[in-house]
Amino acid sequence: MKKKSFWFITVLMTVALLGVFVMQLYYIREAYKLKSQLFDEQVNQTLTSVVNKLQRLNAADRINRKDIENKIKRSQDLRQRQLDIKDLRQQFAEAADLRQAERENEMERYLNQQDSLIRASYAAPKVISESEYVSLSPGGKSSLDLQFNAFVDVNYKVRGISLRSKFASPDAKTFDFRTPQNLPDTIRYQVFEPSTGRPLFLGLPKISDDLVKKFKREDDIAKRQLELKITALGKDTLPYKTGYNLLEDVAKEMTEKNVPLANRINFASLQETLKKSFLDHNITQRYNFRVKLAQKDSVLYLQASYPQQTFLPKNTYRTTLFSNDLFRDPGILEVNFPDKNSAIVGNLGATLASSVGLLLVLVFIFSYTLYAILKQKKISEMKTDFINNMTHEFKTPVATIMIASEALKDPEVTEDKARLKRLAGIIYDENVRLGSHIERVLSVARLEKGELQLENTEVDMNDLIMIVLDSMSLQLQKKNAVLNINTDAENAVVFGDELHLSNVLYNLIDNANKYSKEVPEITISTKNVGKNLIIEIADNGIGMSKEHAKRIFDQFYRVPTGNLHDVKGFGLGLNYVQDIIKKLNGTIKVSSEKDRGTTFEIALPL
């Protein structure tokens, strides 16, 4: 990909990403506005319902209170009426007693008057009982004992006669109601006719018909007066009289001007109503509220989690408590939500999460795309370098073989057996060199496809190291390399493919030999750590930076050396080494410093 095309694609993707980001911000902002409006509507509807309920409760409370007051007053009036009726009846009874006393006096006068008449008309009158009357009547068993006294003058002429029966009464009053009197309805007299002296029986009614009528009339008048007084008392005291209007009475009370707002609100009921109404409208955020006077800046009631919190206008909602009050302060209810913004943002959690997630996905795709493009660009460059190196590596032995082949055509050369043998050896060595290059490339290809089959056996790594060093002796001697061999591992037997393990050692020792500016000093050591065999190959070569050390195991990657190309290679060796070690369940690490050398550490399970 050309550089201009790369930057053009990068700019387009950046603009698209910024556009999506701006659209997401706009969408989130509009969603926040919508949620805020819905929250405002819910709160305002809740406050309206609370105020309406409060007004109804206030009216109902006043009606109930008035009704209770009327019931109490009615009960008091009924008790007072009962007391008054009791007093009237007591007065009636006292008046009846007085009337009875007066009646007894009248009856006493009447009886004594009649008694005087009887005594004046008859001789020796005597009041007798009913039983005496029956005994003395014809057919009775009693007899009458009479005393006869005659008064004569000097000439013996009878001047008067005095008769006295056994039942004669004294000279005192016959009837005296000051003492208890048990008189029958008819009082019986035993008398004598003045002229003949013949005994007679008279009956005197206890009370005359006129007195009975009089007394009955007086009782009727007293009873009617008592009933009238009781009736009048009931009309004066009962509160629920005809035409009484409780609602009108309450309405008159509610229009009174001098009733304070605090006396018209039950703050505990208001708090409970607010709490229940907010929960009914799914408003669970923390809130504060206060009740103020509308005509004065005076707070009557405050309910707040923290009293020092201010009622900010953007988080505060107001409504009138008693909008129908024309003459009294209607009052203001203010509700504040200190966590309104966080609550709305919390409600937008799913929206924000989806938006942020989408943006992160887009950023990741954008970043990964740029990374993939850059990586492919680098791989393309490394492949170009690989092809160039491979062409050069293949070209040299091919050219050598071609020159040797042309020399074999010369008859003089074919006659010289020494030269012929030497040219044949050159052709053979160059063919082996070509074969090793081709085998290396094919091995990496097979590793990538997973087609490489390892023939694992028990391999003594101490012995294998010595074998590899022996095969590389000419290369090492060419640069006068100094070898330090420390095969101290007592147990160096691992389970692996001997051929590929030897290639691994060859690659690492060859790199240590090639990337040394002066006389190479190569240290090879083995040791046992736990159940692993540790193999370290260290050199004093040119080393590399940490950034390059992280990538040396990548395919086709070669540490850049400027314009110098004195060290040839495909960039496949260390990638091949890592793949073989991983297939044997081992690990490989590298530590290096610029111009200080490099150390490779291989860990293989025993």
Image (spheres, rainbow, N blue to C red):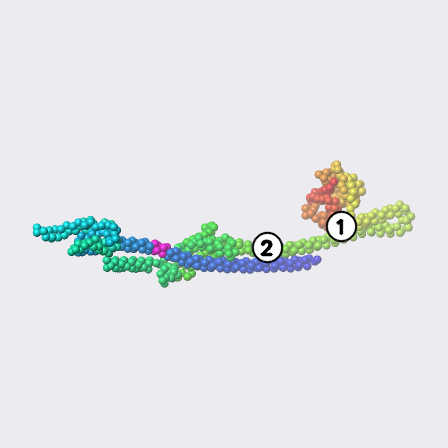
Secondary element at image label 1: loop
User: For mark 2, what is the residue?
Assistant: 353
Give the spatial CA distance, label 2 vs label 1.
42 Å
Q: Which mark is residue 486?
A: none
Report crowding for label 1: few under 14, some 14 to 19, many 20 or more residues within 10 A (C-alpha).
few
| Residue ID at (59%, 55%) | 353
Answer yes or no: is residue 19 visible.
Answer: yes
Which x, y percent locates residue 351? 58, 57
Q: Is residue 158 left or right of residue 468?
A: left
Considering only vertical position in the picture, is 467 above or below 203?
A: above
| Residue ID at (53%, 56%) | 344
> Which stretch did the figure color magenta?
72-79
Q: Is residue 369 left or right of residue 304?
A: right
User: For mark 1, what is the residue?
Assistant: 450
Which x, y percent locates residue 604? 73, 42
Residue type at mark 1 is Gly
| Residue ID at (71%, 44%) | 587
Residue type at mark 2 is Ala
Quarter placement of the N terminus: bottom right
Answer yes or no: is residue 519 visible.
Answer: no
Between residue 516 and residue 299, name the one nearer to us. Answer: 299
